[in-house]
Amino acid sequence: MELTERQTGILNNIIKNYIRSVEPVSSEFLEKKCNFDVCSATIRNEMQKLTDAGFLSQPHTSAGRVPTDKGYRFFVDSLLQEHSLKEDIFESDWFNGEMDDTIKFLQSVTKNLALVSSNFSLGYLSDKKIFWKEGWEEIIKEPEFKERKLIDDFIAMVKSFEEEIADFDLDADIKVYIGKENPLPKAREFSAIVTKCHFPKNEQGLLAIFGPKRMDYDKSICSLNSLIHLLDKV
């Protein structure tokens, strides 16, 4: 299904508002808060088309809509095109004093990525086989992690990623794995944003962001793009 401009706008607004609110988004909300210049009945009709096509789902008969994996994928593909130009978010001077110590540099990079993206982040030095993880405290505050099972699944997914990292076919481009797209076990409710990178002294490595499927993809992709751009200058 090729989406019209209106359908694209409705889908994008539903995803953005669901990311913020963690609540299904209704046609009445979109009519009041978004400038579509059509009535809620028209918006509701477009939402039904998006639901029938698999971009949205309806948790309850009278509820609004939430994005599916397919809906997130459409949204993320647009973001990846928008952020193909590197954006400078990070300042280069925060790691200048740590460039002589590769492990401290890895720790600093991973910590700053977690802070800026507001997600769990992982850094990896390929030659030394060293992982560093940051952002546990913040990620478990997300509403999804009120369920103990999801915390256990998230931990299991990260552990599997570490064990199977060699099986990921990665390059310098950012790759986003959404829900069922993620080849790792226990990953159905999560997303991963991963890319290869290089650190000082020609050390090869990898950076990744993990979070619920409802993660702020715009902020996360932009943060990772900016950091990769900065590392390219090191």
Image (tube, helix red, strand yellow):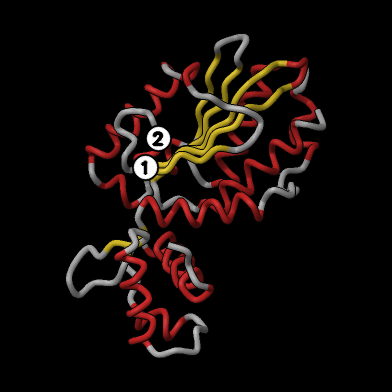
Q: How crowded is mark 2: few (under 14 residues within 10 Å), some or many (20 or more)?
A: some
For disc 1, the marked residue is 179
Quarter placement of the C terminus: top right
Residue 78: x and y in percent read 57, 56
- The one of 88 and 85 positioned closer to us in this rendering: 85
- Please name the residue shown 74% across and 47% down the image: 86
Give the vertical position of 42 relative to 122 (above or below). below
Residue 82: x and y in percent read 66, 55
Residue 222: x and y in percent read 63, 49
Q: Residues within 10 Å of mark 1 (few under 14, many from 20)?
A: many
Three-letter amino acid code at the position of disc 1? Gly
The residue tagged with tag 1: helix, strand or loop? helix
State left or right for residue 231 relative to residue 115: right
Q: Which numbered circle lies on residue 99?
A: none
Q: How far apart are marks 2 and 1 (CA)?
A: 6 Å
For disc 2, the marked residue is 182
Give the vertical position of 34 relative to 155 (above or below). below
Residue 171: x and y in percent read 62, 28
Question: Given contact means CB atoms under 8 Å apart, are the residues at marks 2 and 1 in contact?
Answer: yes
- View extreme (left): residue: 61
- Please name the residue shown 40% across and 90% down the image: 39
